[in-house]
Amino acid sequence: MQIDLLIKNGQVVTAAQAEYPVRGKKMQELEVIENGWVACAGDQIVGAGAGEILPRGLDITESTQVIDAAGKVVTPGLVDPHTHLIFGGSREDEFYLRAQGADYMEIMEAGGGIASSVRATREASLDELVASGRRYLKWMLSLGVTTVECKSGYGLDLKTELKQLEAVRILQAEQPVELVSTFLGAHAWPEEFKDDQEGYIEFLLNTVLPRIKTEDLAEYVDVFTEKGVFSVEQSRRIFHRAKELGFKLRIHADEMNTLGGAELAAEMEMASADHLLMVSDRGIEALGKGNVVPILLPATAFVLRKPYAPARKMLDAGLPVALATDFNPGSCPTANLGLVMSLACLYMAMTPEEVFHAVTINAAHSLGRSDRIGSIEVGKQADLVIFDVDSYRKIPYFVGVNLVSSVVKAGQVI
Ligand code: NIG
Ligand code: FE
């Protein structure tokens, strides 16, 4: 077979294991090939190994592109499984206030926060949302991120929610980062329904969710289950309807308060339970019994100056931890998954080995894609990153520095 792309002489982090997701202790066992190579044909990985000599059957020809990765690290394309990519405006005014000591939930209760991004997103045109999304995706790609989950939730009306999801669809067609679309209509109470919560829930159940299904605009449904936002009972109703319509589920769980979102995720066999800063021991135990991927978002804890999620407890309980940015205009205005990796090491005591599983294969698993992306294995899509350091442990160590030298998406060097 002719190879189209050969990357050689690098330290290759495959993140491959026998079973996905990678759980608890297994997350320590990162597969690394010293002086390794990765061969690609078309959009696929067709081989990986150590040394100079390729196995029989893999042929280098004149048209093979060869990249010498000597002194560099090669990893799977990074996967960011929780972002709020599409929004109008920005909230540096609130950042200023929070820097002076204001509290995130207080700003929200006073009509700012998510509501202010809802106003800006309703006002923005589809073209404007596509343009800002395009810009943020460029940042992410330059940081080695090749797959991104994107939530709606800054419309809270039919027209704007559809506009946000439509922006994701347009971006998917025009740029290389793979996008996974999630409907988050239950992100806050819209102004029009602030005295009629039941009315908004009925509207989501009977009008919005069926419409999004018919137009095939989202793969997942998410709810912000939080004190003052959607109660566990209200969330359960939304998730039941979503499941009935054929959506897969993710949840904003136990972020500011211990509400039982983790238990709800386990009960409803969700794909992921995200945030978990305030998860209880019972919540961790419930997650341990199911197949839910806990997605931790340490950059949000950092920006909000909140306690970090108990990652070590979850790892000790054998959970398959993943990491994400939570990129959004309020609680986490960073698109930098590399920074998240450093914060996970420094503030959640995760090791670089655990962190690499968390931003590759486990993140991919939470998006239902661990059979196709998230590790360097024969038959998988050729999504790869080359970092300009000689050891993967230096990647979280150089905090806040973008060390990416090239990104390969579906076999194409970008
Ligand atoms: O994941 N928690 C709810 N939603 C976002 C914040 C959105 C915003 O502040 O605009 C989050 O933190
Ligand atoms: Fe979020």
Image (cartoon, rainbow, N blue to C red):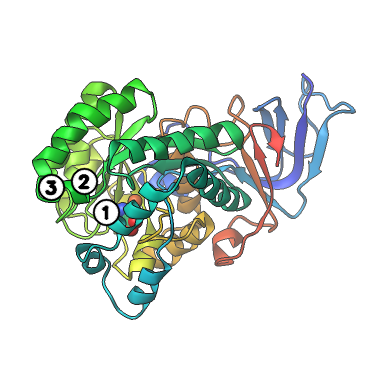
Horizontal and vertical percent position of residue 247: 30, 27
Residue behind mark 3: 231
- Label 3 vs 2, first from the N-terminus: 3
SS of the residue at dot 2?
helix
Label 1 Cα neighbours within 10 Å, binned few <14 / some 14-19 / many ≥20: many
Residue at image coords 29%, 67%: 307
Which residue type carries mark 2?
A: Ala
SS of the residue at dot 3?
loop
Q: Nearer the viewer, residue 173 or 276?
A: 173
Disc 3 vs disc 2: Cβ atoms closer than 8 Å? no
Residue behind mark 2: 262
- Label 2 vs 1, first from the N-terminus: 2
Q: Confirm if mark 1 falls within 8 A of ligand 1.
A: no
Q: CA distance from mark 3 to mark 1?
A: 16 Å
Q: Nearer the viewer, mark 3 or mark 2?
A: 3
Residue behind mark 1: 276
The quarter of the image holding the C terminus is top right
In the figure, 20 relative to 351: above or below?
above
Residue at image coords 61%, 37%: 175
Is 108 placed left or right of 351 in the picture?
A: left
Disc 2 vs disc 1: Cβ atoms closer than 8 Å? yes
Residue at image coords 59%, 66%: 398
Q: Is residue 116 visible?
A: yes
Is 168 placed left or right of 314 in the picture?
A: right
